[in-house]
C-alpha cells in the first residue's frame, strides 16, 4: 500500500496548515478545518507514524543569526549513492538532504558556524569515495 493513497483531502489540509505554522494548536487547526480536535490529533499522529511528518522545526534566518549556509549540489557515482547519503545523514551540519532528478543527484542544505567550517564540510564531502563533484551555493540572504 502506497502512503499517498492513505492521505485524503483533510490530511492534505492539515499538512498545508502545518507547513505554514508548525506550532498551530490542535484547537486552531480543528476550527480552521471544521473538524473535531480529536480528529486533528488522530490524523497528525497517523501522519507522524507513517513517516509523512518527520519532525517539526523553527524556520531560522541563518544569515541574521550570524551563521553560514549553503545549498550544495553533490554528484555521486551510482554505486556509491546510498553510502554517501548515509554518511551525510550523520553530519549535524547537514540539516536537509534531498535526492533529486535535477542538475545534481543530491542537494544538501548545510549550516555552519562560519565560512571556514562550511569549507571543511564541503572538503569532507569531496573526499567521500564516489563523490564526483561538489557544487556549493552560499546563501547570502533569505527572503522567505
Image (cartoon, rainbow, N blue to C red):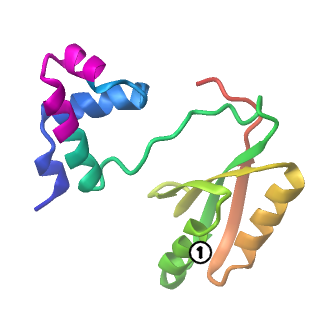
Image spot of residue 63 (x, y percent): 76, 33
Q: Quadrant of residue 72?
A: bottom right
Q: Is residue 125 left or right of residue 85?
A: right
Q: Say which element carries label 1.
A: helix
Query: Residue drawn 15% across and 31% down?
Result: 38
Image spot of residue 133 (x, y percent): 69, 69
From this viewpoint, is residue 104 visible? no
From this viewpoint, is residue 110 visible? yes
Above or below, comparing residue 26 to residue 41 in the picture? above
The count of marks equals 1
Query: Residue drawn 46% across and 57% down?
Result: 100
Image spot of residue 139 (x, y percent): 73, 39
Above or below, comparing residue 52 to residue 129 in the picture? above
- The residue where tag 1 is placed is 87
What span is colored magenta in the figure? 27-42
Graded by Cα atoms within 10 Å as few (under 14), some (14 to 19) or many (20 or more), the crowding at tag 1 reads few
Query: Residue drawn 51% across and 40% down?
Result: 57
Above or below, comparing residue 114 to residue 8 in the picture? below
Residue 117 shown in magenta: no
Which quadrant, please, contains the C terminus?
top right
Q: Is residue 19 left or right of residue 30?
A: right
Which is nearer the eye, 70 or 39? 39
Residue 32 shown in magenta: yes
Image spot of residue 47 (x, y percent): 24, 46
Q: Is residue 15 left or right of residue 100?
A: left
Which is nearer the eye, 1 or 35? 35
Amino acid at each position: 500500500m502506497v502512503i499517498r493513497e492513505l492521505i485524503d483531502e483533510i490530511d492534505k489540509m492539515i499538512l498545508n496548515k502545518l507547513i505554514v505554522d508548525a506550532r498551530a494548536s490542535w484547537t486552531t487547526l480543528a476550527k480552521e478545518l471544521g473538524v473535531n480536535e480529536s480528529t486533528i490529533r488522530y490524523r497528525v499522529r497517523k501522519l507522524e507514524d507513517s513517516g509523512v511528518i518527520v519532525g517539526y522545526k523553527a524556520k531560522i534566518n541563518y544569515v541574521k543569526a550570524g551563521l553560514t549556509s549553503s545549498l550544495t549540489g553533490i554528484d555521486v557515482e551510482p554505486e556509491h549513492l546510498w553510502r554517501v547519503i548515509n554518511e551525510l545523514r550523520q553530519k549535524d551540519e547537514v540539516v536537509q538532504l534531498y535526492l533529486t532528478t535535477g542538475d545534481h543527484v543530491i542537494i544538501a542544505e548545510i549550516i555552519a558556524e562560519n565560512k571556514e567550517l562550511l569549507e571543511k564540510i564541503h572538503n569532507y564531502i569531496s573526499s567521500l569515495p564516489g563523490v564526483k563533484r561538489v557544487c556549493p551555493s552560499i546563501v547570502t540572504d533569505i527572503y522567505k
